[in-house]
Image: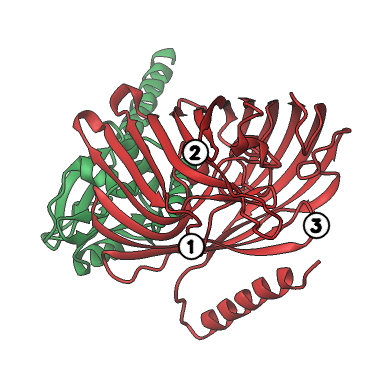
Chain colours: A green, B red
Amino acid sequence: MQLVSKFIFLCMSQFFSFGMIYAQTSDGFIITNRSLTITMDDAIDIFKGQKQLVGSVKVAPVDNTSAQNNFLSKVLGISVAQYNVLWSKASFGDGLSKPGVKNTDAEIIEAVKSTPGGVGYVTTKPGDDVKVVGKFSENE
Amino acid sequence: MSNRFLMIPLMILLCLEKAQADGNFGIPVHGFADALWGYSTKGNVPREKLNGFSLGTFDLYLVPQFSDRVTSLIEIAFEPSMDEGDVGLDVERLQMGYIFNDKLTLWFGRFHSPYGYWNNAYHHGAQIQTSIAKPRFIDWEDHSGFMPAHSVGIWARGQSRIKGGSKWTYDFYITNGNHVKDTTLDMNIVRDDNTNPALGFNLGYGFGGAFSGLLIGIHGMSQKVNTQEEDKDNNIDALNSDLKFGGGYLVYEAHNFEISSEYYHFDNSNLNKDSKTKHKSSAWFMHVGYFLHEDVISYVRYEDSKLDKDDRYFSSQKNGNSYNRSVLGLRYNLNYKAALKIEGTKTKIKESTSFVNKNNFNEIRIQYAISF
């Protein structure tokens, strides 16, 4: 009986630990309009309000509410609250407009695809409509 | 109290309401507002002493973009006067810019003088500023400051990323020189009253990597300030001073800390008809905040100024006195658009001037500040 319960416990713990690992490996992709060429450092600057132009193209970053927490903590290294404060200061001090906001990957891809300076991030690998600049995940 | 304080914002809000109802959102209006309660012990610095409830500044700003490169920033502020209790309407900033690239944006118009960090980063943004009061000497000219916080002229600003996420930042500006009007520094909004414009710079270095969040910089300004207007009828000659200051600043925002410090060394001269006399002074502050929780920050600040009282740049201003101040406060963010703060200050006016006597006073203030 003891052996059976040990076995059940082992199975359950393996199941839950696998579940946790699986949950931690959700990926994210930073994407741009196909006409735009930027690096990961550029993407960080763009979402911090420190880069406005790539060549002669004005950048147009868009936040994705479904992936924002992960993107901010893994790529920018800040929380949502800190991000909001950062943009309040950038808007008031430098006259910048906060990134637009979309709720789903499909909306982000559509916005990035249709705007020459579009930059965004999504949770699933996008098609060829947009360019993937970099990848981020919980395990990075 | 003037009805303008209520009528103008009300009209703006009604227009916005109408625009939204029509489905035309136009240019977003942002702003700040705050209300205060305060108690001060005895003292004779009326501009600063607050007893009872008070309206703070109601500030509105817009950032219309006219093309990818043509930009602007328009800010108006409704400020209750500490002297008269009336509400003044100020075109706080009206700056038109052209973005050449990330390394150069050229602004033209009226802007916040870009010395140090605090003056340009927070200014009327009560909700984004951690503390209730600004460091006293960099407060606005008509409150308790003696620095030229506002400017009219041309301003070049930019930044350049270097290896490892570090970056250089810079500001260069040429503006109308200031003059002292009714014991308060005035920026000469319409014309320069002498042929000597103000020249200033601010060079910063933002660290990347392990020191990310750290910004250090140097700054300086030079200008001729008219401290007394000529009055031919009463045989009074104009008096001028050379204002020259240089110094440095440090900002650190990481690992739950929020630290900022600014230092100013003044090497001013009284310009007489045939001679000039030199006067050295200094002012500085250090502010240290620590996040006890994501939404709660405690902070302390110490400020000190040692001003030569024979320096006409300071002695002609009501606020030009040596002082020190200790500040202790606590801030709670209800969310990222609203904050409740409580702050205690202990101020010592070190020397008597023509406008205030040597004295000490303590204050406690509570502020509710919002942004939108």
In the image, residue B228 lies at what x, y percent? Answer: 63, 48
Q: Amino acid at mark 1?
A: Arg
| Structural crowding at the residue carrying mark 1, measured as other residues with C-alpha within 10 Å and reported as few (<14), some (14–19) or many (≥20) | few
Of the two numbered discs 3 and 1 on the same chain, state the one appearing first in sequence.
3
| Structural crowding at the residue carrying mark 2, measured as other residues with C-alpha within 10 Å and reported as few (<14), some (14–19) or many (≥20) | many
Q: Nearer the viewer, residue A9 or A92?
A: A92
Quick one: SS at disc 2?
A: strand
| Residue A57 in the figure: left or right of residue B114 | left
Tell me which residue sits at (24%, 67%) in the image.
A110
**Quadrant of the image occupied by residue B345:** top right
Task: Determine the CA span between mark 1 and mark 2.
Answer: 19 Å
Of the two numbered discs 3 and 2 on the same chain, state the one appearing first in sequence.
3
Q: Amino acid at mark 2?
A: Asp
Quick one: SS at disc 3?
A: loop
Quick one: SS at disc 1?
A: loop
* Residue B135 shows in the view: no
Task: Read off the residue under disc 1.
Answer: B191
Task: Read off the residue under disc 2.
Answer: B242
Disc ID at residue B84: 3
Q: Amino acid at mark 3?
A: Glu
Task: Determine the CA span between mark 3 and mark 2.
Answer: 31 Å
